[in-house]
Amino acid sequence: MMVTKVLLAEPRGFCAGVEKAIKALAWMVKVFDPPVYCFHEIVHNQVVVERFVNQGVVFVDSIDAVPDGAVVMLSAHGSAPEVIESASAKHRISVNAVCPLVTKVHHEVKVRSNKGYRIIYVGHVGHDEAVGTVAVAPQSVSLIETEQDLEELDLIRGSEVALLSQTTLSMDEWAGVRERASSIYPNLWMPNRSDLCFATTNRQGALKDIAHLADSIVVIGSANSSNTVALEKVALAAGCPNVYRVNSADELPDNLHGLVGVTAGASAPDELVDQVVAKLAPIEGVQKVSHVDEDEYFPPPPELRDLMKTVTDLVAIAFGVERTGKNVLEDDRAISASTVLARLSQDK
Ligand code: SF4
């Protein structure tokens, strides 16, 4: 391997939704004895999931697999309404770590369905986010993945039709379907801003800035991470001849050379980026290429905020000290999920 320089895309890696979910689950494992259950992978990244497994978190793909009365968290990807209801009805503590931008799409589905629209939802079949979103109004939603699927849809042309999407598609993939759908359905309803989230579009924009300059692009993230796979597509569409998605530095190919661009999906921790750059060992060092500043922050789930306030009050009562009314989560913004993950690895 003879890498001259690494171009590091900014922003990359953890988004605000992933930060929120990881920190929330970390609090759960600190407050409760194991096992804490989590419905679906908290985020789609092997390193993150394994770190929580080592802390006694049990990940399940069916809410029925959670014993009655257990402590359960629902993942960042959003859950079907019946899953949310079941979790809060049957379990002692239920915290929903859904990203607010996924909740926005759920809301759009609900409102359009109630107004009698047929909804075309562009997403990935079987992905947790798509499954949860379709379940909001399955009778009204048709899930498609490609422009070809759109052609084959059996919707009545004169009816009211809305077009919504998973938050993590590639911008090009989305644009193609949007244009074709607009030509088929002239009165098509779409949200003012597309459902693609800021993190998705920012990471793709940052990658586009470097993909045409680099001999190779390395995308760090898991194969089941939709926004990571979208980054691979963006790099290829931008004309980069060699695009590699890796889970970790161990998977880097031996033949990388010249200028190498590096980015990471929204669920990939900083530590993986550091390890990849260290292994690439660029002769002329690392150049950060900033596309846009990103300072979005999502506060902890409301159920967790209430819970932590109760815990703080109980500790004060138990030790006979004055209750300050301060919630330990007030400092949440100052702590990064990467730091939290690093601490978890030291704990076991
Ligand atoms: S990728 Fe976007 S929608 Fe998904 S968790 Fe991050 S901010 Fe939320």
Image (spheres, helix red, strand yellow):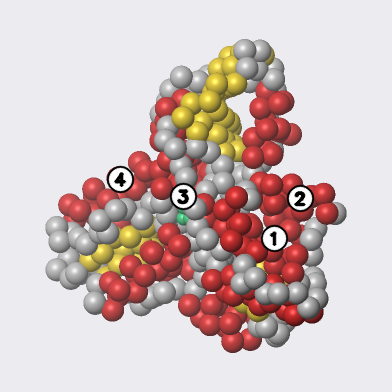
Q: Position of residue 74 (x, y in %)?
A: 59, 69
Q: Position of residue 143 (x, y in %)?
A: 38, 63
* Residue depicted at 49% across the width and 61% down the height: 99
N-terminal label among 1 and 3: 1
Q: Are marks 1 and 2 in contact (CB under 8 Å)?
A: yes
Secondary structure found at label 2: helix
Task: Find out if the beta carbon at label 3 lies less than 8 Å from the nearest ligand 1 atom.
Answer: yes
Quarter holding residue 107: bottom left
* Kind of residue at badge 2: Arg
Secondary structure found at label 3: loop
Q: Nearer the viewer, mark 4 or mark 3?
A: 3
- The residue where tag 3 is placed is 296
Q: Position of residue 288 (x, y in %)?
A: 53, 25
Label 3 CA crowd tier, 10 Å (few <14, some 14–19, many 20+): few
The answer to whether residue 15 is visible is yes
The answer to whether 247 appears left or right of 150 in the picture is right
* Rendered position, 164 above or below 47: below
N-terminal label among 2 and 4: 4
Q: Between marks 1 and 3, how big is the CA–CA gap?
A: 20 Å
- The residue where tag 2 is placed is 343
Q: Are marks 1 and 3 in contact (CB under 8 Å)?
A: no
Near-viewer residue (278 or 187): 278
The answer to whether 193 appears left or right of 283 in the picture is left
N-terminal label among 2 and 3: 3
- The residue where tag 1 is placed is 26
Q: What label sits on residue 175 in the rendered view?
A: 4
N-terminal label among 1 and 2: 1
Quarter holding residue 170: top left
Q: Between marks 1 and 2, how big is the CA–CA gap?
A: 10 Å
Which quadrant does the C terminus fall into?
bottom right
Q: Nearer the viewer, mark 4 or mark 1?
A: 1
